[in-house]
Amino acid sequence: MNYGWQLCCDVCHARSLGRIVSLSDASGQENQETGETVAMKTRHIVGTAVIIVFLIWGASVFLDTTIQYVSIEEAAQSRSVVQVMGKIDFDRVTYNTDDLRLEFAVYDPQAVDTANAERLHVVYYGVIPGNFNQASTVVLKGKPGNDGVFIAERMLVKCPSKYQGEVGEEYQDIRKHEDAASSSGV
């Protein structure tokens, strides 16, 4: 009778029933495992693998949705989707109502010489935002097309706040407030 084969079958049968099996390892010490211990290890391995897969997936989704802001010059040369902020050149705004095509140009909002600042020609398909004519700046998300025109997928219009002071004032003048309050009798 083949004793090795019989031992293997007894061990497998005992494990399937969840009984303790004693085996000697290479050092001669006994190693005891139950069916529950093996199942627990398997669950831990599978759980760890699932967590690792979700962490990798989450990191890749995060990196895919992260879009950097670039300058006007960088946006014109970009090969991927970017975000760019610019002031609208209202002299170059046209809208085709049939195609819902808005064409305009933007320039660097921090440009000192706005007349000679580099312009980025932009095309946006969709309805013109209601406050486009009052916009101080726009944030555009998109990329240049084959013809060099920036195709904006999304447009965020930034309007000046109605709570800001007059043009050129960075802080409210307290004397104007005191004069107005005293003349009104408050």
Image (cartoon, rainbow, N blue to C red):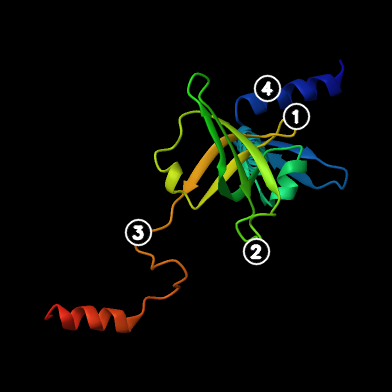
What label does residue 162 carry, if any?
A: 3
The residue under label 1 is which amino acid type?
Asp
Q: Is residue 38 above or below residue 5?
A: below
Pointer 2: what residue?
Answer: 112
Q: Are circles 3 and 2 on residues that touch, CB within 8 Å?
A: no
Disc nearer the start of the sequence (3/2): 2
Quarter of the image with the C terminus is bottom left
Q: Is residue 174 above or below residue 60?
A: below
| Pointer 1 residue | 147
Viewer-nearest of discs 4 and 2:
2
> Is disc 2 placed on a helix, strand or loop?
loop
Label 4 – label 3 distance at C-alpha = 81 Å
Residue 67 can be seen, yes or no: yes
Look at discs 1 and 4 and give the one toward the viewer.
Answer: 1
Instruction: Establish if 59 lies above or below 185.
Output: above
Instruction: Give the residue at mark 4.
Output: 13
Horizontal arrangement in the rendering, residue 79 relative to residue 66 (left or right): right
Q: Residue at x 64, y 41 (%)?
A: 48
**Badge 1 or badge 3: first in the primary sequence:** 1
Indicate the amino acid at tag 4.
His
Query: In the image, what residue type sits under mark 3?
Result: Lys
CB atoms at circles 1 and 3 under 8 Å apart? no
